[in-house]
């Protein structure tokens, strides 16, 4: 165990943890904005109640997304100074743009939304939640463009041992990013849809109030559409992976040798003939490269070393992602069918909807493990090894300290967040009309 | 182009310290100037709508350092590893404390998090920047004491400006007390820098003290904000020559292409950011009173 291993663990722990909250922020923000729009359009009180109810859950979660995100931005410099120095010219740009073009908008307008209920004209107040929610989605685009560049670097040249950007447009329209952005944002909407489904399912088991049916129906539609986007872009990503990241594809399938008409291994021992070749290229007889043959080719190209990622993690995370992701989408399609033309939600369906909370969270976590463990041993594919990326001056003790502190802090915050969310879900919607502004105001002498 | 980007980064850090400086001060002082839960809410509500947007100045400053001066970004945060990690812990507990305190049954834990999460970064940012300029622990401690004291003063003046009733009165007393500490510390810390802006910053702190004494809260706030700007200016004037031991800006900088592209986007976007953040302060321009 050395500083490199711990730095990797720290990145893994903090990133996976961060991304438990981010998808809810991305998807639920838009959902709340949609509810408030429905209230604005129809004037129906239950839309306002739902807006406030899900708005509160959104805010409890939003805080965690923000504070865990700050760690991410500093972590590159702290633990990965060699990486940062090598890539900053290219990789730093989307990060800076993310802060400037997305985070300012998200945070500022969310503050206006939270405190502006009585202070802003209704239309302006509605625009604030949309601006905040769009800000979250724009931020996802920039950070995914940065992430995609690590796996498929474009628009740069290496000068004096550092990457130099030559084409910002190429970085921002990287084919890998364009496939990944709808895939991840779609997944975020599946997570958020699943969250609303679980909350609505809980309430449908307790009350016949029609508002929970409308919330659940809206979430079913959102989850089903987002699920279709995730599946479609997942297929597209697989074909890009075949071209750009063959080692990851081979590892995800446990394919050791270059094979024409390669079979898709469902689980070890159960294979569907030619399906892997078909999924990778849409040609059933195409050759798919295998890990061992790629390893010897990489050794020729880059010198001695092990160029295979952790086979077990990549293989199994791929399956967890697909199974749990599809299960959530299947549940939403089933729900849509069963409740067509205003039919009632069967009790067992409401109960099953509770599963829509954990399943997509497990799927996105597995998806990130596949994506980032599958990138190893590189931080920038073909250019920089993870082992050469770590901060040389940071000691094992220092990383161990921060890893321990962050893990303990994150653990206790996770418990608190779950307790808080559960309490507010159980409390339900506020049945009384919302009270007027909590504070009295008098003019400031000067501002 | 390198100089332009250094100025932009200095501007972003300065904006961060001016804005989050009073957030830290308010977070620290809220328990001291409030005698009831309602007054606590009143105190914290002065920063409620804006603190998160203020914190984005830090995210943008650090993102801009990463993009424009990668080696500087990497060097600073890997060499000040533990202080930076502690800053992050502070920002985490402060952030969740502020967001969650209205949603928990007993907000005492949130309040403790807000105080600790305001005090730790307010002190450590000063210590880190002092550590960039001077060797040795005493310099870092003095820098930390300086930023902590100035944040408390800045926050106290902001509270006096933004509240009514007893909290406003107590905030003024707190500001005078903070000034009593901040002034001598500032003389010690800023005389080490010795530049004209550093001396002007000391003068601005003295002016702020006189103004808050005379209950000119708006002008006093302008003076503490001015002191923060002038201090940041004098620090970045030094950093321009030596951003990190053994590193020059030119060596740390990204290529001209990246800097040019970022300049165009930044110079177009920044006015919009300033406009809507300014608008937020306009929307919430009124004093906050106690809610019963």
Image (spheres, coloured by chain):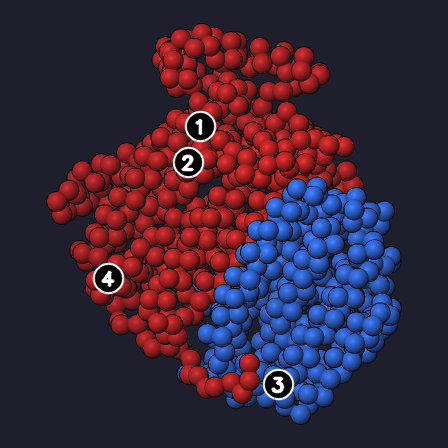
For disc 4, the marked residue is: A41
Q: Residue at x 71, y 58 (%)?
A: B7
Residue A322 location (% of width, % of height):
39, 29
Q: Are marks 1 and 2 in contact (CB under 8 Å)?
A: yes
- Judge if badges 3 and 1 mark residues of a common chain: no
- The answer for how far apart the CA atoms under marks 1 and 2 are is 8 Å
For disc 3, the marked residue is: B217
Q: Secondary structure at mark 1?
A: helix
Q: Residues within 10 Å of mark 3 (few under 14, many from 20)?
A: many
Q: Residues within 10 Å of mark 1 (few under 14, many from 20)?
A: many
A429 versus B252 height, above or below:
below
Marked residue nearer the N-terminal end (1 or 2): 2
Residue A293 location (% of width, % of height):
57, 10
For disc 2, the marked residue is: A183
Q: Secondary structure at mark 4?
A: helix
- The answer for how far apart the CA atoms under marks 4 and 3 are is 44 Å
Q: Residue at x 64, y 84 (%)?
A: B219
Per the rendering, the colour in which chain A appears is red
């Amino acid at each position: 165990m050395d500083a490199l291993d711990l730095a990797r663990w720290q990145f893994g722990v903090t990133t996976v943890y961060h991304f438990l909250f981010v998808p809810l922020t991305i998807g639920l923000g838009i959902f709340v904005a949609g509810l408030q729009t429905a209230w604005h359009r129809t004037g129906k009180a239950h839309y306002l109640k739902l807006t406030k109810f899900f708005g509160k859950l959104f805010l409890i979660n939003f805080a965690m997304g923000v504070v865990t995100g700050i760690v991410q931005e500093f972590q590159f410099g702290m633990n990965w100074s060699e990486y940062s120095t090598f890539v900053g010219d290219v990789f730093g740009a989307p990060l800076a743009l993310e802060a400037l073009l997305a985070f300012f908008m998200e945070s500022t307008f969310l503050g206006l939304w939270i405190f502006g209920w009585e202070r802003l004209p209704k239309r302006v107040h509605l625009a604030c939640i949309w601006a905040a929610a769009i800000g979250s989605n724009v931020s996802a685009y920039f950070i995914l463009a940065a992430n995609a560049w690590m796996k498929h670097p474009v628009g740069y040249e290496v000068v004096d041992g550092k990457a130099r950007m030559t084409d910002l447009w190429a970085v921002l329209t990287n084919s890998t990013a364009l496939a990944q952005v709808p895939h991840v944002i779609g997944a975020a909407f599946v997570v958020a849809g699943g969250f609303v489904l679980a909350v609505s399912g809980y309430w449908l088991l307790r009350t016949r109030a029609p508002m929970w049916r409308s919330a659940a129906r809206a979430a079913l539609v959102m989850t089903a559409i987002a699920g279709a986007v995730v599946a479609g872009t997942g297929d597209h990503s697989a074909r890009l992976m075949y071209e750009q990241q063959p080692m990851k594809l081979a590892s995800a399938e446990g394919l050791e040798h270059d094979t024409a008409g390669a079979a898709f291994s469902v689980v070890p021992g159960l294979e569907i003939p030619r399906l892997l070749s078909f999924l990778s290229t849409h040609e059933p007889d195409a050759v798919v490269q295998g890990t061992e043959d790629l390893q010897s080719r990489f050794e020729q190209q880059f010198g001695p070393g092990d160029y295979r990622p952790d086979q077990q993690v990549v293989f199994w995370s791929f399956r967890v992602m697909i199974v749990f992701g599809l299960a959530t989408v299947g549940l939403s399609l089933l729900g849509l069918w069963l409740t067509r033309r205003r039919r009632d939600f069967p009790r067992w369906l409401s109960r099953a909807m509770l599963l829509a909370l954990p399943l997509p969270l497990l799927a996105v976590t597995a998806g990130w493990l596949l994506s980032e463990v599958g990138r190893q041993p590189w931080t920038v594919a073909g250019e920089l090894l993870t082992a050469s990326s770590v901060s040389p001056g940071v000691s094992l003790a220092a990383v161990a300290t921060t890893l321990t502190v962050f893990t303990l802090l994150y653990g206790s915050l996770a418990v608190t967040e779950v307790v808080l969310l559960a309490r507010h879900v159980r409390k339900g919607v506020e049945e009384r009309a919302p009270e007027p502004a909590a504070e009295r105001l008098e003019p400031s002498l000067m501002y | 182009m390198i100089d332009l980007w250094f100025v932009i980064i200095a501007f972003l850090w300065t904006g961060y310290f001016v804005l989050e400086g009073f957030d830290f001060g308010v977070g620290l002082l809220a328990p001291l100037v409030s005698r009831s839960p309602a007054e606590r809410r009143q105190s914290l509500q002065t920063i409620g709508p804006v603190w998160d947007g203020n914190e984005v100045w830090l995210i943008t400053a650090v993102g801009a350092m990463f993009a424009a001066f990668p080696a500087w970004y990497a060097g600073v945060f890997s060499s000040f590893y533990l202080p930076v990690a502690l800053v992050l812990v502070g920002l985490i507990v402060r952030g969740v404390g502020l967001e969650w305190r209205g949603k928990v049954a007993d907000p005492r834990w949130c309040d403790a998090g807000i105080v600790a999460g305001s005090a730790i970064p307010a002190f450590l940012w000063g210590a880190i920047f002092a550590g960039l300029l001077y060797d040795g622990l005493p310099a870092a401690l003095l820098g930390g004491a300086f930023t902590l004291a100035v944040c408390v003063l800045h926050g106290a003046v902001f509270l006096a400006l933004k509240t009514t009733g007893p909290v406003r009165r107590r905030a003024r007393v707190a500001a005078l007390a903070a000034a009593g500490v901040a002034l001598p510390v500032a003389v010690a810390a800023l005389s080490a820098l010795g530049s004209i802006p550093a001396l002007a910053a000391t003068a601005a702190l003295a002016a702020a003290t006189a103004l808050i004494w005379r209950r000119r809260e708006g002008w006093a706030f302008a003076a503490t904000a001015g002191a923060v700007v002038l201090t940041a200016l004098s620090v970045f004037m030094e950093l321009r020559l030596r951003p990190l031991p053994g590193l020059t800006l030119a060596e740390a900088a990204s290529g001209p292409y990246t800097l040019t592209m970022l300049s165009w986007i930044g110079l177009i976007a920044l006015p919009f950011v300033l406009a809507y953040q300014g608008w937020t302060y306009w929307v919430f321009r009124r004093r906050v009173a106690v809610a019963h």
